[in-house]
Image (cartoon, rainbow, N blue to C red):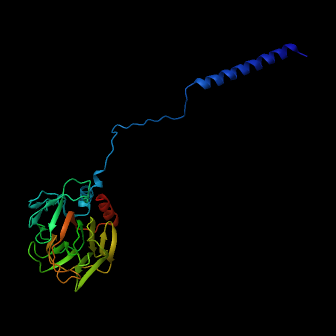
Amino acid sequence: MNLHRLRDGKVVAILLVLALAVVVLLNQFAPTRSGFSAQIANSANSAGTAASNTCTGQVGFDASASKALFAYRFTEATGSVTAADFSGKAANGTYQGGMTASTPSPIACPRDPGTAWLLNGSSNFVSTPALQQNPTTFSEEVWFRTTVAGGLLIGFGGSQVAVSGQHDRQVYLNTSGQLVFGTYNNGTQVVTSPKAYNDGTWHHVVATMSAATGMALYVDGAVVASNAKYTVPEPGNGYWRIGYDTVSGWPGSGSNYYYTGSMRFAAVYGSVLTAAQVSSHYGAGR
C-alpha cells in the first residue's frame, strides 16, 4: 500500500470539505442578488374623483363628440334670468316665469357643486335661443324629481315662448306618472315606461331618435321602452323647451302642461347617445 498517496488524498478531501463550508457561510451572510432590477416611483402621490365622474364632466366630455346643441346645469341663483350653456355652443337659455334655486337632499349629481332648479308648475320653464332646422337625429336628457303626475319635461315646439301650434319630440309625464316619449308622423308615435316616476326621488331620462335606431327611452341608465319602426318625426323647425309647452292630444297628457318639481342638468345632442354613454351619464349623477 502507498501510504504517501493515501495521506495526500485525505488532505485533498479535507480541503474540499473546508472550501465547501466557507462557500456555505459566505452565502449565508452575503446580500441577496437577483437577475433583474426595478424602480418604482410615485411622484404625484394623489387620489381623488375623476372629473368625468361628475355630470358636468360626463356631459362636457360628450358635448363635442355627440354634437351637443346645449347643456344647462340649472345651478344659477334665485332670480337669475339666464341658464348658462356649458357645451361650448354659447346657446344660453332663458328662465321664463322666474328662477328659484333649491337645495334638496339628496340631490342629483352630488359631486357637482351648486343647487337645483325648483319649478312651480304654473309659470316656470326655459326657452332656448336658436331656431333648429328639423332635427331628425337627436338625444334629449334631463335629471328630474317630482311627486306630480303630468307635465312636459323637455320637447320641441314651433314657438320659442308661446304655446306651440306644432309640437313634437316630447318627453312628458302622463297622468299615471309614467314617462312618455312622443313624436308625430301621420299620427302619434309614443313609447312609454312601464313604471311611474312621480315618486319623489331623482331620476335620469334620455330619449333618442334616428332613422337608423328608431325611438328609445332610457330611465336611470337603462332602456325601458323602444320602437325601431318609429324612425321619422314630424317635419318642422322650432325651439327646444324645458319644463313647459303644450302636450295637447298626446296620450295621457292631462290638463296642466307645466312640470312641477326639481330639475338638474338638461342637454340636447344632435346625435344618438349610445347605451354606454347613457349609463355613464346616469352613473355620474348617483
| Residue extending furthest toward the right | 1
Say which residue appears at 80% left-offset and 18% top-offset. 10
| Residue extending furthest toward the top | 4
- Quadrant of res 75: bottom left
Query: Is residue 212 shown to the viewer in this render?
Result: no
Say which residue appears at 69% left-offset and 20% top-offset. 19
Tell me how many marks there are.
Answer: 0
Camera-nearest residue between 255 and 139: 255
Coordinates of residue 81 in the picture (x, y in percent): 8, 61
In this rendering, the answer to whether 32 lies above or below 112 is above
| Residue extending furthest toward the bottom | 186
Say which residue appears at 73% left-offset and 21% top-offset. 17
**Which quarter of the image is occupied by the N terminus?**
top right
- In the image, taking residue 146 as reference, residue 277 lies left or right, namely right
Coordinates of residue 279 in the picture (x, y in percent): 33, 63
In this rendering, the answer to whether 213 lies above or below 220 is below
**Which quarter of the image is occupied by the C terminus?**
bottom left
- In the image, taking residue 74 as reference, residue 280 lies left or right, namely right
- Quadrant of res 250: bottom left
- Quadrant of res 65: bottom left
Camera-nearest residue between 70 and 54: 54
Camera-nearest residue between 248 and 185: 248
- In the image, taking residue 237 as reference, residue 52 lies left or right, namely right
Query: Is residue 225 shown to the viewer in this render?
Result: yes
Coordinates of residue 52 in the picture (x, y in percent): 29, 54
